[in-house]
Image (spheres, helix red, strand yellow):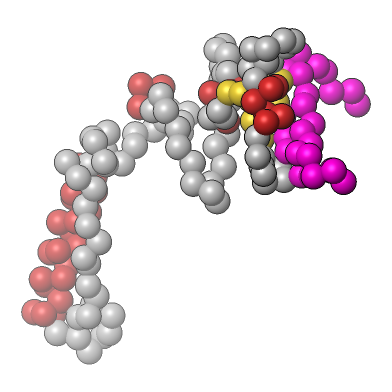
Amino acid sequence: MAYPTNDITTTYLDSANDSIGLARAELYNALTRLSELIDSRATSEGLCPLDSNAQVPQINMPTTFTSGVSNSIHLQPGDETVALQGVLALDSYTVAELEAWSNPAAGTVAYCSNGDAGDPCLAVALGYDVGGVEQWKAVALGSLISS
């Protein structure tokens, strides 16, 4: 069942002087849409159900998440591991490929597979140095952040 449309009008429902007869069709339409909304629970493109803790049951969670530019995705796994590369959906590059990358925007983040040597890392493009060479700051994923 597709999510119901929002075609509810209130032309004859917003004033004490409105006609009861004309309001009847609007009330019927509104109740029909409400019924469709209730019936859409736990259906494809419908409302998502909640469990007794007001959380989406695991069975209703997608296995792939997509986020727009202004949306944040927060994952809080229980007893499972979330791969950073998978969460960030970063392309994997070797260090040599990053060094050969022409004109990366400052702030570009990439996952270093380090297929050419060393441990996997995250790399952030810092921009160009004086010689016009791209500069990357790489942080090994095994490194700890000191406080």
Residue at x 69%, y 22% (from the top left corner): 96
Q: Residue at x 65, y 20 (%)?
A: 94
Image location of residue 50, percent across then percent down: 39, 33
Q: Quadrant of residue 20?
A: bottom left
38 sits to left or right of 29: right
Instruction: Please give left or right for residue 11 compared with residue 80 in the image.
Output: left
What count of labels does the image hold? 0
Q: Residue furthest right?
A: 147
Q: Quarter of the image containing the C terminus?
A: top right
Q: Nearer the viewer, residue 61 or 111?
A: 111
Determine the residue positioned at 55% across, 12% down: 80
Front-most of 103 and 79? Answer: 103
In the displayed structure, 128 sits above or below 77; it is below
Q: Give the residues in magenta.
A: 123-147
Magenta span includes 31 = no
Taking the image as drawn, is residue 51 in sight? no
Using the image as rendered, state which of residue 44 and residue 54 is in the foreground.
Answer: 44
As for residue 124 lying within the magenta part, the answer is yes
- Up the image or down, 107 lies above or below 140; here it is below
Splitting the image into 4 quarters, where does residue 77 fall?
A: top right
Residue 41: percent from left, percent from top: 26, 38
Residue 74 location, x and y as percent? 57, 34
Horizontal relation, residue 10 to residue 110: left or right = left
Residue 31 x, y percent position in the rendering: 18, 58
Q: Is residue 117 above or below residue 135?
A: above
Residue lying farthest to the bottom in this orientation: 17
Question: Quadrant of the image for the N terminus?
Answer: top left
Quadrant in the picture for residue 25: bottom left
Residue 77 visible, this orientation? yes
